[in-house]
Image (tube, helix red, strand yellow):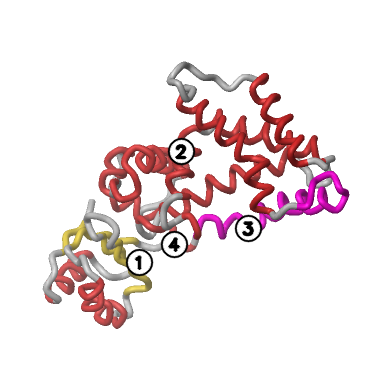
Amino acid sequence: MEENRKNILVFATDIKTKMEKKQITTPLNDLAAIEEWNIDQKDVDCVLRIVSQSITAEEVIKLINELGFNCAELP
Amino acid sequence: MRTRDAGKEEIVKQKAIQMIVSQGIEGFGMNKLAKECGISVATLYIYYADKDDLIKKIGTQIGRNYFEAMIKAFSNDMPFAEGLRKQWDIRISFWETNKMEVACWEVLQNSTYGEYINQGMVDLRAIIVAFYEQAIERKDLVPISPEVFRSIAFGPLFSLLKHHAIGKKLDGTHFTLTSNVIDEAFNLVLKALTP
């Protein structure tokens, strides 16, 4: 699978609802460094999963915090 | 950089199946699953995009294993009685050797994932449908709708398998599925389905 060679970052968030997901959609879509992202709203941790070669965890956390949500990198 | 590990992926599948059976679809979370497998949540999200993706992949794989086992031993041009018996035997041995998978399959079939998973089985089911259609053409089978065929051909078997899985008869005493019981039921089914 192509994804094997890519870097995947995962974060626990409190982005729980569809409305909240909408708030992060445009900012994440607009970032060229992010190849792919999704959020697992069926899971308790509302895990945000990001596929990117270049973005750092700190940059993602900063962005999500600025949008008003908690965001912690999962080990 | 995290990479995939086939051994770990198999552990994840087995644990996920156990958790779906014991805790239900709503009850299990990716974090708990990762802990049970001794891996990080992040690793889990390399294998699967999200919980939805995990459930769909696991359900599809159980179904495909089941139908592939069926198709390996059975061909749709077998005489009707022989072909049907083969299908019974394969179903019985699959239930015996894959108890957890069968239980998980049942949970998923009764959930919102049922439809998605069944879509992935259409090509394999078609072989069994062809067997049924040919049997009607050859007049080995009374002309009935596929749903009625399925109910009568396999309903009694599933009912017996459920008793076998619980290990109890209706009155609560011990039950095991013996070859005598299977033969008795199969012969009655055959009697109902053949002209």
Q: Position of residue B167 (x, y in %)?
A: 47, 22
In the image, residue B187 above or below residue B44 = above
In the image, residue A47 above or below residue A37 = above
The chain letter under disc 1 is A
Q: Amino acid at mark 3?
A: Val
Alpha-carbon distance for marks 4 and 2? Answer: 32 Å
Q: Which-is-in-front pick, marks 4 and 2?
A: 2
Q: Amino acid at mark 1?
A: Val
Helix, strand or loop at label 1? It is strand
Residue that badge 4 annotates: A3
Q: Are marks 3 and 1 in contact (CB under 8 Å)?
A: no
The answer as to whether the residues below labels 3 and 4 share one chain is no
Instruction: Please state the extent of the stretch shown in magenta in the rendering.
Output: B116-143
Residue A51's mark?
Answer: 1
Alpha-carbon distance for marks 1 and 2? Answer: 34 Å
| Residue B10 forms part of the magenta stretch | no
Residue B103's mark?
Answer: 2
